[in-house]
Image (spheres, rainbow, N blue to C red):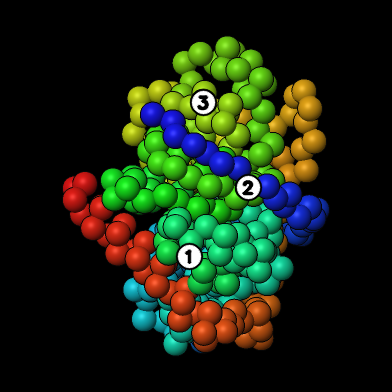
Amino acid sequence: MSKSVSPVPFTRPQVKVPPHPQWPTLTDVELSATKTRIKKLLARRDAVLVAHYYTSPDLQELAEESGGCVADSLEMARFGSVQNAKTLVVCGVRFMGETAKILNPEKHVLMPDLNATCSLDEGCPADEFSRFCDQHPDHTVVVYANTSARVKARSDWVVTSGIALPIVKYLSERGEKVLWAPDKHLGRYVQKLTGIEMLLWQGSCVVHEEFKAVALERIRKLHPEAAVLVHPESPEAVIGQADVVGSTTALIRAVQQMDNKSFIVATDGGIFHKMKQLAPDKQLIEAPTAGEGATCQSCAHCPWMGMNSLQNLEQVLDSGENEILIDAEVREKAVIPIQRMLDFADKYQKNKR
Ligand code: 13P
Ligand code: SF4
């Protein structure tokens, strides 16, 4: 089935990984008072929280308690677009805030920390990417949502991990060749399952890259009954051991729906909160990031997701600072492939029902 996967002769810029931020631990009384103040500020600004599964349990709970959502990146984009609120506060990483703004130019989009970027986004500079596209005009350009607005503006399709495979299958059926960026692991996984001809940008997620295949084999031997759940940003040899490969939502659903009593989970540890909430009787085991050759910098905790906290959320809601702004010309171009993805996902999910 496998056709050509041509790696790009490009060394991606060294992405500087920040230390994981430390936030003060709040007592129950402080936590409850902080949440109450934030809810008031949300009402005052006519704002709604849109949070990712990798953010802290406190933020996830607050998002849900206050009528917002906790979701994967596809659902975050969708949720923001159907809100009447004047302001969206995106607790996640920068590309998620930018996608929200691109889809909702009339709304204010705020983020607790504008430095909350993503190694995939950082590893795909727009000018270099654009030159690469220019060299391959016969390829359909498919970019992962974890990219800047300018990179999206240069693409034909945007995909998230939740919809990448069906979209690329569709392109494959139309006989198209794909130029894929930036995540080489997700790209290789999609290429393997579709057989499509693909040029791969050589980016990766510093968090998922740390999962270790040899150590995972060992843990699987200790827990032979456990199902292995893997996010497709992980290395090929880790994906190769998975019972389920999918988006954060797909992995959460697997814990709820599979009969297994235990699960080895290869993705950011933030996801455990929702998994425990929905399946409290299941045993969850972190996939190993240590072992031979380990250079663990983030140890299954995205440092950029960690930049979101109740403290800076409150500050931003109070001041109105940290607004996401997108150049109008870039937005006009970037909205097309994002909307194409959302329309495709709507139809695809309706047909599946
Ligand atoms: P999901 O779309 O699966 O939530 O993934 C986003 C992400 O950044 C994973 O690292
Ligand atoms: Fe980006 Fe990886 Fe963090 Fe997801 S976990 S936001 S892909 S750095």
Q: Mark 2 = which residue?
A: 8
Q: Dot 3: what SS?
A: loop
| Badge 3 amino acid | Gly
Select label 3 or label 1 by which is in front.
Answer: 1
Instruction: Tell how many labels.
Output: 3
Ligand 2 closer than 8 Å to label 2 CB: no
First-in-chain label (3 vs 2): 2
Measuring from the top left, give residue 279's x and y in whole percent.
42, 37
State the residue at coordinates (40%, 23%): 260
Look at the image and tell me in which quarter the N terminus lies: top left
Q: Residues within 10 Å of mark 1 (few under 14, many from 20)?
A: many
Q: Real-space Cα distance between discs 3 and 2? A: 23 Å
Q: Real-space Cα distance between discs 3 and 1? A: 29 Å
| Badge 2 amino acid | Val
Q: Mark 3 = which residue?
A: 240
Q: Mark 1 = which residue?
A: 155
Give the answer, above or below, for where 19 lies relative to 106: above
Q: Are marks 3 and 2 in contact (CB under 8 Å)?
A: no
State the residue at coordinates (49%, 79%): 331
Give the answer, above or below, for where 311 lies relative to 249: below
Select label 1 or label 2 by which is in front.
Answer: 2
Measuring from the top left, give residue 295's x and y in whole percent.
80, 36
First-in-chain label (3 vs 1): 1
Give the answer, above or below, for where 160 lies relative to 109: above
Give the answer, above or below, for where 160 lies relative to 222: below
State the residue at coordinates (61%, 73%): 111
Quarter of the view holding residue 250: top left
